[in-house]
Image (spheres, coloured by chain):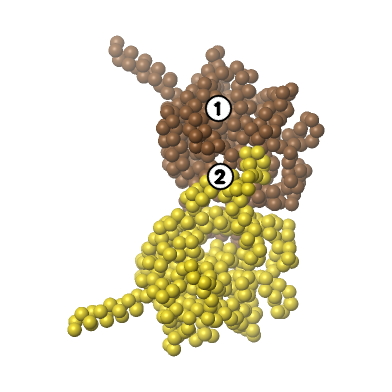
Chain colours: A brown, B yellow
Amino acid sequence: MTAILKPTIEADYTFAADTPFALECGAALRPVTLRYTMYGELNRRRDNALLVCHALSGSAHVGEWWDGLFGPEMPFDLSRHCVICVNILGSCYGSTGPASINPHTGRRYAGDFPVVSIGDMVRSQALLLDHLGVDKLHAVVGGSIGGLQALSWAMLYPDRVDRCVAIGAVPLSALGLALSHLQRQAICNDPAFKNGFYEAEAPPAAGLSVARGIAMCTYKSAQLFEERYGRAPNRNGEKPAEKLAHRYNVSGYLDYQGEIFIRRFDANAYLIISKAMDNFDFGSDHASQEDNLRRIKAKVLMVGISSDWLFPAADVFALTRRMQEAGVNAQYHELESDHGHDAFLANADLLVPLVKPFLHEDEMKKAACGLALTGER
Amino acid sequence: MTAILKPTIEADYTFAADTPFALECGAALRPVTLRYTMYGELNRRRDNALLVCHALSGSAHVGEWWDGLFGPEMPFDLSRHCVICVNILGSCYGSTGPASINPHTGRRYAGDFPVVSIGDMVRSQALLLDHLGVDKLHAVVGGSIGGLQALSWAMLYPDRVDRCVAIGAVPLSALGLALSHLQRQAICNDPAFKNGFYEAEAPPAAGLSVARGIAMCTYKSAQLFEERYGRAPNRNGEKPAEKLAHRYNVSGYLDYQGEIFIRRFDANAYLIISKAMDNFDFGSDHASQEDNLRRIKAKVLMVGISSDWLFPAADVFALTRRMQEAGVNAQYHELESDHGHDAFLANADLLVPLVKPFLHEDEMKKAACGLALTGER
């Protein structure tokens, strides 16, 4: 592993200072700030941008959480590409979200923050790209909610996206909706939640920890948990056969993940982004979904993860087929991993051979052409 | 559907009035009451008893929750069998549990109730059978935690069990342990929980409801949820795309299940039984597990449920193989259903052809013998 990859630029872009930014839910935000990073440089034609979209609890620092995809001859090759990553609307890592100060009240939005959609996130990113002078993306790439944004980009801005890579990303199933709902219930039931109007120093930590625990179960796979933890008791000598509060190893792991998470993430932001994940779909009914799928002009690479039970590979495959039937140039590849949904991060190395040819296709064609010419001589 | 099948006898048996009933955790209970039912009559030799063991939130009223297995020429045929069902130790439907009054203090056990094991439940049931004069069971039958009890019966009392039917029952996987833990966390985090010392009229309802919701997800299957609920909004006109608190149909269903459950079940009993489920295994290490499996003399019918992800069919199959390798007369059948773990209740009709031949084997052999003799004449 190399040192942490630092962005060339990390900055905030603020818009909608006068005209509010209208959201799909009917509410609006004024103003909106987006924290973004750029790795590498835009070329003169500004046509070498890769927009990387992050997942639920991610940040604009894609060089930290997807460092395995960066490098010479890697999918994100900064000698060719300029990688842009934007902290999503509703998050707590620099962009406008529930923990931001509402300039009109001087207080945090907190429980007043409106529902945002994946489409809202993408439309806000499009305004940032306008500001950066990027008319067309070489590609938009993401896993999980990042993949939903990538799909939404291809659908909402068909003329601005050349290639779309969506990994472990489809409209959530009923089971996924159910588990999302229970996570939000765990947070909202916490007496510290106070309808979202908690103090920054007294958040609904216990509820958020349980929510994160449920989410971790959906991000990992039964196989992985079995291999790693099995039925071993918690490592500190707890005896689950004797005391109700004593845990198995996997429970100690989940509690620890909860402890880390409550220190780094805002509960209201979690609710807003989790809801955006739930609400993503291509349209409100089959007909509108087909219409929207037909709009897509980008070449699409859909990646299913074999052990993913939150966004099952079979669902990703089925969506790819639907896209193809709608005339989209979509292809499906499967990432074989027992890491579950999380494999898009945990097994980034396995993504390289899938994503790189797709992103470098033009260069590879040029190189092949060169070779052919050489051969003719 | 016929009218609800009423037990011939419903009674309480109290024991350990003087000598405490020692539990595996090291604690003891004095006295212990078991609420039990009998359907049909014990024959003169008292060798026609079927002990049916119930699951987490079940009761001794097996005629209500497994009515589909009762009837002439059905698995539970009261012209041949006497069906006995015992509310498990730690439950809240008549047997000693956390909501029971501790006669030594005059108060509910509440948070002081000790951890009980599946083995403790089974040993208490054995004392009841001693009292009833039943030395040997024609069969012990159960699904889920009921199946764990059936397996425990075969292991702890090899000479008292002729046949054992365990449906969707194996030691819980790491993912199962994780989801159990999160359910208990949801209850314990509820400020009404008060370390278990809540008033009967002010239980930790919100926490128990979330726990039940998580459990319902594990009892059902992704397929079933998808078919039944899909991505439809909650039926009362809620608009999840507009309001954070507005739900999808599946979430409304889970909340409703939670509401029903908190009215009928005690949170402390839930914790105790959920912990017993987690703790069930055949031994503390591989060697002791093999030794214990070798002890089993009963014929064993293991049923895996194709869409069960809490007690996966593959795990039930693997356990059957382990039993066979340990010399147990064990057979595996699979119940094909998309109902998930719950299929042992929801698809009881599909159990009939699997369970009936296994339970009626002797009679069928006799009948076949009679036919053969007739043929010879």
Residue that mark 2 sits on: B232
Is residue B227 left or right of A38 when viewed as pictured? left
Q: Give the image quarter of residue A156.
A: top right
Name the front one of labels 1 and 2.
2
Chain assignment, label 2: B
At 65% from the left and 61% from the top, the residue drawn is B262
Foreground of the two, A352 or A13: A13
Disc 1 from disc 2: Cα separation: 23 Å
* Residue found at the very far left of the displayed protein: B377
Residue A233 picture location, percent across and down: 56, 59
Foreground of the two, A71 or B229: B229
Residue B326 picture location, percent across and down: 38, 68
At label 1, which amino acid type do we have? Answer: Leu
Mark identifier at residue B105:
none
Residue B217 picture location, percent across and down: 55, 54
Which element is circle 2 on? loop
Badge 1: residue crowd in 10 Å (few <14, some 14–19, many ≥20): many
Chain assignment, label 1: A
Foreground of the two, B229 or B26: B229
Residue that mark 1 sits on: A156
At 50% from the left and 42% from the top, the residue drawn is A311
Is residue A312 left or right of B323 when viewed as pictured? right
Is residue A116 left or right of A291 when viewed as pictured? right
Is residue A13 left or right of B81 when viewed as pictured? right
* Residue found at the very far bottom of the displayed protein: B44
Q: Is residue A279 at all visible to an observer of this figure?
A: yes
* Residue found at the very far right of the displayed protein: A106
Q: Is residue A175 above or below residue B168?
A: above
Which element is circle 1 on? helix
* Residue found at the very far top of the displayed protein: A377
